[in-house]
Image (cartoon, rainbow, N blue to C red):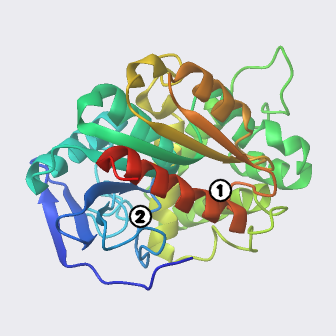
Amino acid sequence: MAFPPIEPYETDLLDTGDGNLVYWETYGSRDGVPVLMVHGGPGSGFVGWRPRSLDPQRYRIIVFDQRNCGRSTPHASDPAADMSLNTTQHLIADMEQLREHLGVDQWLLRGSSWGVTLSLAYAQRYPERVSGMIMVSVTSDRRSELDWLYRGVGRFFPEAWARFRDHAGADSFRLPTDTEPPIEGLLMAYSKLMEDPDPDVRARAATEWLAWEDAVISQESNGSPGAYSDRPDDAKLAFVRICAHYFANDCFLDGVLVRDAGRLAGIPGTLIHGRNDLGSPAITAWELARAWPGSELVIIEDSGHTGSTAMAEARRAASDRMLAAITGAS
């Protein structure tokens, strides 16, 4: 069951103090259990999104657009936006500043894809501030995961991957073998293209990147054609610029999130992942569940990265269980 669409009762921009303004909004009950929605990408934003799977009578739903995307400013589609001020550590600090600004003692984190990675990083830094976690389409953005998503899965889509590779001018980047170098060179090539002063160069690089993203989800039941490419031009540029910036730099995390998942002990967590997620195979969710004491893993047999009806039902059931665990209600 989806709840009726609702409008935010409060919206504002959070001044981070370094020239960035982070857009946020709140929905639902002012006295409800606080839940922070952490979007994917990085760089997707929440423009046009409305909460439908959380009970607005029981939750205080907090949404924010991460730096340089969505309604946050400066926008990454503007080449003048300083990407050196956009790292995982900056986003963690923004989340903590937002929590303090809103007077929230603890909040439930709900993230998808990159939103899982960011939520894990935040929770490992501030475990006492997290009442629970519902993580969907699990990623931790280790180099091995990025290598799979931006090269390894090319074994299934060789034509699309060759086009993605060739646009970067990366003739030496072939499909992976045990002796080949890691993928960061190709990702850095795209990051440099997205910093090119020529707008046509940036636009073409964004088009090729998004075509690859579309190819990866093309076999999924919810992988509608053009899902990544069919967005406004500014949103395309911001998404790809931010993604390439993060992925070329190992998301500024050095692959520690699964290794350090023991820091989450005591935080209830549900990991929901699609068996058919080709771009983000279930091994990451499985390894994370094994490393996170007390977490539960729910594998959705008919779902990929883009979800399914069964995945939506699993999210709602996890929300009900988490609400009961946090409030002590039956």
Q: Nearer the viewer, residue 97 or 149?
A: 97
Q: Quadrant of residue 227?
A: bottom right
Query: Of helix, strand and loop, which one carries label 1?
Result: helix
Residue 195 placement (x, y as % from top left): 45, 50
Q: Residue at x 40, y 25 (%)?
A: 264
Is residue 194 left or right of 330 when viewed as pictured? right
Q: Residue at x 44, y 75 (%)?
A: 49
Q: Which residue is mark 2?
A: 45
Residue type, mark 1 in image = Trp
Q: Disc 1 or 2, which lies upstream in sequence?
A: 2
Q: Quadrant of residue 289?
A: top right
Residue type, mark 2 in image = Gly
Q: Are the residues at dot 1 and dot 2 in contact (C-beta closer than 8 Å)?
A: no
Q: Quadrant of residue 174?
A: top right
Q: Nearer the viewer, residue 47 or 289?
A: 289
Q: Residue at x 48, y 38 (%)?
A: 269
3D distance between C-alphas at marks 1 and 2? 18 Å
Q: Residue at x 70, y 73 (%)?
A: 226
Q: Nearer the viewer, residue 24 or 198?
A: 24
